[in-house]
Amino acid sequence: MGTDRIDLSARAAIHAALGDPGRLAIVDALVLGEASPSELQKLLDMPSNLMAHHVRVLEKAGVVARHRSEGDRRRTYLALAPGAFDALRPTVVRNAVRVVFVCTENSARSQLAAALWAGESPVPATSAGTRPARAVHPGAVDVARRRRVPLATATPRHVDEVLQDDDFVITVCDSAHEELGAGVNRLHWSVPDPARSGENAAFDRAVDDLTDRVTRLAPAIRPAR
C-alpha cells in the first residue's frame, strides 16, 4: 500500500506540473528535441524569470532534465526526462490465466478483440457471447481481412460453455456487461456495435477502438504463474 501511495503522489505531481499552460507549452516544445532556456524564451515569447520558474517546477516533478552543452560548457539544454510520462498511465498489474472477451452475439466485437489481443499479449485469449449468433458477422470477417487482423472465424459460443473460474473477463458491449455484472476479475469496454449499421466504417471504428484499448491494457495483464 505504501508503494502505491508513492506512485500516486509521483503521478499527481506530474499532472500538477503540467496543469499550467506555460509549462505545457514548454513540454510540447521539447517533445521532438532539446532546446536551451533562452531558445525556449524566444520560441514561446516568455520572460526569463517565468521561464526559470516553470523549468524548476518541471524539473522537480521529474518531467524535464538539463545537461551542459558539449560545445559551449556555459550553455545548458533542456530535454524531456526519459520515461517522464510512463507514470501518467495507471500501473495496476493483474495476473491472468486467460482473457475472455464477451459481447452479446460473439460475432464481431469479441471475436475481433480476441484476435487483436493475441498480437499484443502472451496471455491466451478467447471469446464468447451471452446470446451467440450462428456465425461470425460477414462485416467482421471483411474488416479483419482489410485491416490484417488475424481473425480465426470460430463458431460463436455461449459464455456458459467457455467461462472458467480463473478467467479474466472483458465485456465489450453494454448488454453483455449488464447481463453478467461487475466483478473483481472483470472489465467493461463500451464499444458500439458495428453490426447495427453493418457499414464498413462502423467496423473500422470498432477495430480502431478495440486496438487502442487492447494496446493500453495488454502491458498490465501478465501471465499467471
Image: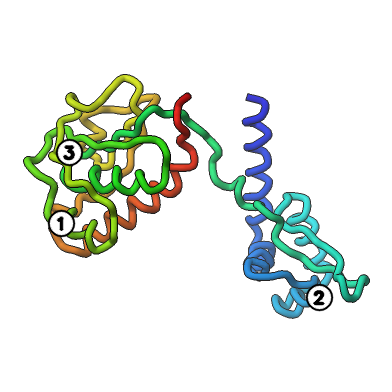
Sooner in the amino-acid sequence: mark 3 or mark 2: 2
The residue that disc 3 covers is 104
Q: Amino acid at mark 1?
A: Gly
Question: Residue 27: which quarter of the image?
Answer: bottom right
Q: Is residue 173 above or below residue 1?
A: below
> Residue 214, position in %: x, y?
39, 47
Name which residue lies at 28% across and 27% down. 181
* Badge 3 amino acid: Thr
- Where residue 219 appears, as percent x and y from the top left, is 49, 42
Which residue does the numbered mark 2 point to in the structure image? 38
160 up-or-down from 77: above or below: above
Nearer to me, 223 or 4: 223
**Residue appearing at x 68%, y 46% in the figure:** 13
Q: Which mark is residue 139?
A: 1
Image coordinates of residue 58 in percent, x first then y, are 74, 56
Disc nearest the viewer among 1 and 3? 1
Between 3 and 71, the residue placed more toward the observer is 71
Secondary structure beneath label 3:
loop
Q: Quadrant of residue 12?
A: top right
In the depicted view, which residue is nearer to us: 212 or 10? Answer: 212
